[in-house]
Image (cartoon, rainbow, N blue to C red):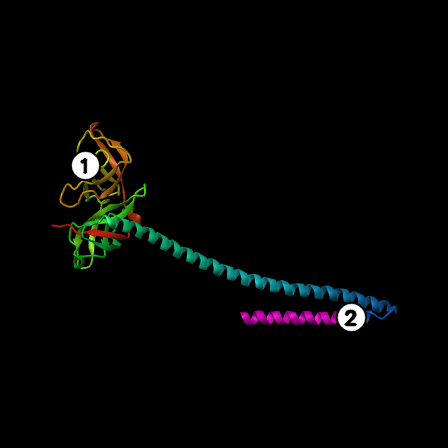
Amino acid sequence: MNFLKNYLKRVLFLFAIFILIILIGLSSIGKTGDVNLGLFGSLIAGFQKVAFNTGKTVTNSFYSIQDIVRMREENNMLTDTVHELKEQVRILENIVNKSNALEIEYEMKKSLDIDHVVGQVIALDDSKWFSRLTIDKGENDGIRKNDIVIKAVETNKGIVQIGIVGVVTETSSNWSKVITMLDENCKISFRDISSDESGIIQGSIDGIITGYFFNSKAKANVGDSLVTSGIGEIYIPDIYIGDIEEVVPTTDASTQKIVVKPSVEFTKLSRIYIIKIDR
């Protein structure tokens, strides 16, 4: 391709030179002092005009082709530069996101004085709503059934807390199965930190977390934060569950159903912590 391009440039250049030489020669012929060449002179003048215009057109075309080739090369260079800049932006964004996540984890670990293992989500188990997953830690890492899976989360107020993900339900040598709080088989007792009232929440087949208070007269408020109450034999107390997103009246006027927005963004779940529960 480069060979043909260079060859075309040379041919056009030589042709332009040839036309210019003819024009110079014809101009010399036309300059014969005051001698009137008559019809022959008129023919020569007409031919000179045609030759001059032709040469000018060829020359302009030659430079136009050069401009097109140059602009195409510059366009290719700019395209490559744009691609390189996009790649650099992607790398920087990835670094920033990881840095923010690691900073949040670092803040969480300051208050995490319980034996734990850092793990990674490696698979979703046919879960439409991220209700079941597999992690890369197992019995070889000291993980056992009913160990709690958590993640560092940041509230809207910029406070870093320990967020509940779910619980280990099955283990192998180097992996474990986990059901998250979105699963219908996952029930967690909670405490409303605003009213100190307790209740229980449960996931569902459509990934919505709902619950109710043990005290039928307890009043729920949208925005109240819920933490684990510690009631039961699995979840330790004061792990951040999420916030009340909606209060739904029931047929029984003395009770209220709550819809909970989890603290963990399960669509972005990747790096997790597993708390080893003493038994």
Q: Quadrant of residue 198?
A: top left
CA distance separating discs 1 and 2: 106 Å
Q: Is residue 60 left or right of residue 74?
A: right
Q: Is residue 38 above or below residue 264?
A: below
Question: Magenta stretch: residue 14 in it?
Answer: yes
Choose the circle earlier in sequence order: 1 or 2. Answer: 2
Q: Is residue 256 above or below residue 9?
A: above
Q: Position of residue 259 (x, y in %)?
A: 26, 37
Give the numbered dot on residue 199: 1
Residue depicted at x 18% and y 40%: 229
Q: The residue tagged with tag 2: helix, strand or loop?
A: helix
- Magenta-colored segment: predominant secondary structure: helix
Identify residue type, mark 1. Gly
> Between tags 1 and 2, which lies in front?
1
Is residue 107 visible to the viewer in this orientation of the structure?
yes
Q: Which residues are magenta?
A: 1-23
Residue depicted at x 39% and y 57%: 91
Is residue 128 visible to the viewer in this orientation of the structure?
no
Give the numbered dot on residue 26: 2
Q: Residue furthest front?
A: 110
Q: Is residue 249 left or right of residue 10?
A: left
